[in-house]
Amino acid sequence: MGTAESRGRVVRTRRGWWSALGAAVLAATCWAAPGAAQAAGADRGAERVGRAAGGEPGARSAAPSGGALTWELKPTGTDARFRGLAAVSRGTAWAAGSKGTVLRTADGGASWRDVSPPGAAGLEFRDIEAFDGRRAVALAIGEGEASRVYRTSDGGRTWTESFRNADPKAFYDCMTFLDRRHGLALSDPVDGKYRILSTADGGRSWKVLPDKGMPAAQEGESAFAASGQCLVGSGPRDVWLATGGAARARVLHSADRGLTWTATDAPQPAGDPARGVFGLAFRDRAHGIAVGGDYRAGQPSPDASAVTRDGGRTWRPAARPSPAYRSGVAWLPYSRSAALAVGPTGTDLTTDGGRTWRTVDAGSYDTVDCARDLGCWAAGEKGRVARLGVS
């Protein structure tokens, strides 16, 4: 358990981080918009995250005082593209990506351990969900048997293949866990309806749910395996899935762990296989953010971000949306108003619940995830993984 003195050092270290973060977000808010601090009223700490540094990760902000929020690159020693990411804490994170690569850090990204499942070099991992530093579930995507689920309970030293898709018409894109036992995985439509895979034992076994309560898919509609966030949950039963590629972008919601669903149109660009909603984040069962657009380089993405306040029954485009396609989004822990969105051309920050966004970094990332201790991580192409810091 450690001595009282060592425990005191840990407490002081945590307090120091929170103090530095609070100073950075307060200074950034004041710089971002005159009068923002007064408008925030009693909001504190992470509730008042404002503009951080522009330019490449690690650049310093022009904020007048208190430091700046920055992405701190953590070299991984690989050129894999990481679209799967699980933030456990500021110290521990998992990344999953191309060429069957799975990495884990337990020292804040100072070093990475290659914990890729044996024989997986030909697979494309696009999602990973971690319960802690030892237990994680990883999803590989693709047609037919390329879609697989692996599980580890010893930090990646050994893996068990707990699901292999046998239906050539199915293509699994992403997954989510509602607690340590209940999880779902999403496949593109099979015979006109999205297919949902379910586990009730932490990913040890899976079963396909009946599709009776699933609305019909639109012609050409699918989900995007871009960030591991096309299927997300909040609380013990609520789940949302994001779609694109059809005449209308949509978000589907289930309040019973995937048995029945309702569909709502989203304002993101649609009408093309490259357009739609790519990532979702909900801070509770009512308040959510959707990001997406057109993933093709150089293509415009108006209304790339949208918000809901009623659990996804209605979606409204942001008043000042992300300026370009974004694939991943995450709420800052303990905040009712601050979130980050990432994509190949940069990172955007909102401090008003998704209504307006500012670009705060120009680095390329595909996905972002935050742990409860404010350990926020981002990952993307060419082995890029970074942790949010205060400089």
Image: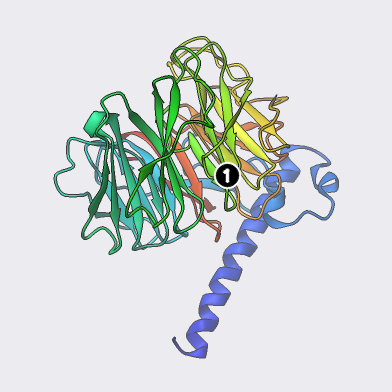
Quadrant housing the N terminus: bottom left
Residue 138 appearing in the image: yes
Q: Is residue 149 left or right of residue 350?
A: left
Q: Is residue 232 left or right of residue 267?
A: left
Q: Position of residue 145 (x, y in %)?
A: 22, 33
| Residue closest to the eye, 209 or 368 | 209
Task: Report the residue at 54% width, 32% height from top.
Answer: 213
| Residue closest to the eye, 373 or 61 | 373
Q: Is residue 126 left or right of residue 250?
A: left
Inspect the image, locate mark 1, and give the three-letter code of the amino acid beneath it.
Asp
Mark 1 burial class by Cα count in 10 Å: few <14, some 14-19, many 20+: few
Q: Position of residue 208 (x, y in %)?
A: 38, 39
| Residue closest to the eye, 32 or 123 | 123
In the depicted structure, whether residue 36 falls above or below residue 246:
below
Image quarter of residue 83 = top left
In the depicted structure, whether residue 296 falls above or below residue 212:
above
The local secondary structure at tag 1 comes to loop
Residue on which disc 1 sits: 256
Q: Position of residue 112 (x, y in %)?
A: 29, 55
